[in-house]
């Protein structure tokens, strides 16, 4: 599940927000109530994709020959 961090422009408080796909809601600061939130880049979900999907489910390596 993607978790994004938003930082309040007013007071600088960082809030973690669980964001589902397709959801575009406005986030407000829990401290001062301001809706001016800046999305921060999180370490989750960045990079590391596509390198672990090559025949990892076949222990003998012969599964692809049975077509
Ligand atoms: Zn705030």
Image (cartoon, helix red, strand yellow):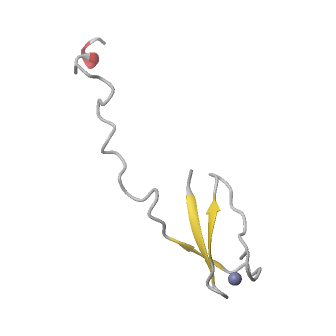
Quick check: 48 above or below 37? above
- Which residue occupies the extreme top position in the image? 66
- In the drawing, does residue 12 fall left or right of residue 51? right
- Which residue occupies the extreme right position in the image? 33
Quick check: 59 above or below 33? above
Residue under the image location 48 percent in, 69 percent down = 41
- Which residue occupies the extreme left position in the image? 61
Quick check: 10 above or below 25? below
- Residue 5 lies, in percent from the top left, at 57, 69
> From the image, which quarter does the C terminus lie in?
top left
Residue under the image location 56 percent in, 50 percent down = 1
- The number of callouts visible is 0
- In the drawing, does residue 29 fall left or right of residue 4? right
- Residue 30 lies, in percent from the top left, at 73, 75
Kindly indicate the quadrant of the structure image that contains residue 10. Answer: bottom right
Kindly indicate the quadrant of the structure image that contains residue 57. Answer: top left
- Residue 19 lies, in percent from the top left, at 63, 57
Q: Nearer the viewer, residue 67 or 14?
A: 14
Quick check: 45 above or below 11? above
Residue under the image location 37 percent in, 49 percent down = 49
Residue under the image location 34 percent in, 37 percent down = 53
Kindly indicate the quadrant of the structure image that contains residue 7. Answer: bottom right
Q: Indicate which quadrant contains ligand 1.
A: bottom right
- Residue 22 lies, in percent from the top left, at 65, 53
- In the drawing, does residue 66 fall left or right of residue 3? left
């Amino acid at each position: 599940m993607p978790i994004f961090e938003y930082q309040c422009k007013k007071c600088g408080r960082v809030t973690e927000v669980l964001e589902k796909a397709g959801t575009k809601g406005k986030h407000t600061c829990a401290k001062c109530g301001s809706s001016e939130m800046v999305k921060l880049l999180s370490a989750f979900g960045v990079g590391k994709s596509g390198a672990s999907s090559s025949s990892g489910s076949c222990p003998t390596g012969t599964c692809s020959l049975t077509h």
